[in-house]
């Protein structure tokens, strides 16, 4: 049974930082491109960041709205992916979801959310002004 479990969400003031984690089980983690999406109230789920299954720094992809503020990374030994979020803004308030897609590039995940194989249940991030 595949499980993606997010943690690390919470409430923070604008300008603050949070680090999200996604722990995966039931998949061969190193074969999966991993990513983050978010959904704000009344809005569609949107792409945030992804890191390809090869895991190199060159194989990350970010939404324009978070470039320079968010960084995603992974630890294959721990079957865990991270999202470091700095300089948070009220517009970043959303439920953040972990996603997994086997053997495709980070760009594929970023441009086609329907290609995602597995989703986590989400963790809430609230940024106050």
Image (tube, rainbow, N blue to C red):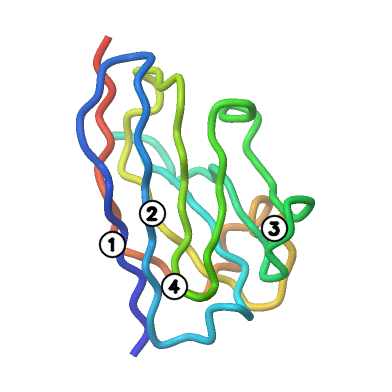
Q: Which residue is mark 3?
A: 106
Taking the spot 54% from the left edge, 42% from the top edge, the residue there is: 48
Find disc 2 in the rendering and name its residue.
97
Q: Residue furthest right?
A: 58
How many angstroms separate mark 4 from mark 3 (CA)? 20 Å
Q: Residue at x 57, y 58 (%)?
A: 113
* Comes first in the chain, label 1 or label 2: 2
Q: Are marks 4 and 3 in contact (CB under 8 Å)?
A: no
Judged from the image, the secondary structure of the residue bearing numbered disc 2 is strand
Task: Please identify the residue farthest to the top as the structure is shown.
Answer: 129
Instruction: Point out which mark residue 2 bears.
Output: none
Q: CA distance from mark 2 to mark 4?
A: 19 Å
**Mark 1, other Cα within 10 Å: few <14 / some 14–19 / many ≥20:** few
Q: Is mark 2 in CB contact (under 8 Å) with mark 3?
A: no
Residue displayed at 60% across by 78% down: 30
Residue 101: quadrant of the picture: bottom right
Pinpoint residue 116: horizontal percent, then vertical percent: 55, 68
Q: Secondary structure at mark 3?
A: helix
Give the residue number, with chain letter if any, for mark 1.
121
Horizontally, residue 75 falls left or right of residue 123, namely right
* Of the two numbered discs 4 and 1 in the rendering, the one whose residue sits closer to the viewer: 4
* Cα gap from disc 2 to disc 3, whole angstroms: 16 Å
In x, y percent, where is residue 16? 35, 20
Residue at which label 4 appears:
78
């Amino acid at each position: 049974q595949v499980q993606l479990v997010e943690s690390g969400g919470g409430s923070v003031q604008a300008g603050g930082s949070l680090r999200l984690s996604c722990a995966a089980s039931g998949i061969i983690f190193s074969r999966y491109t991993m990513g983050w999406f978010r959904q704000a109230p009344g809005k569609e789920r949107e792409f945030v960041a992804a890191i390809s299954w090869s895991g190199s720094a060159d194989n990350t992809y970010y939404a324009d709205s978070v470039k320079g503020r968010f960084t995603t990374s992974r630890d294959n030994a721990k079957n865990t992916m991270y999202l470091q979020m700095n300089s948070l803004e009220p517009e970043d308030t959303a439920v953040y979801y972990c996603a997994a897609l086997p053997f495709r590039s980070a760009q594929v995940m970023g441009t086609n959310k329907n290609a995602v194989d597995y989703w986590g249940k989400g963790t809430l991030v609230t940024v106050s002004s």
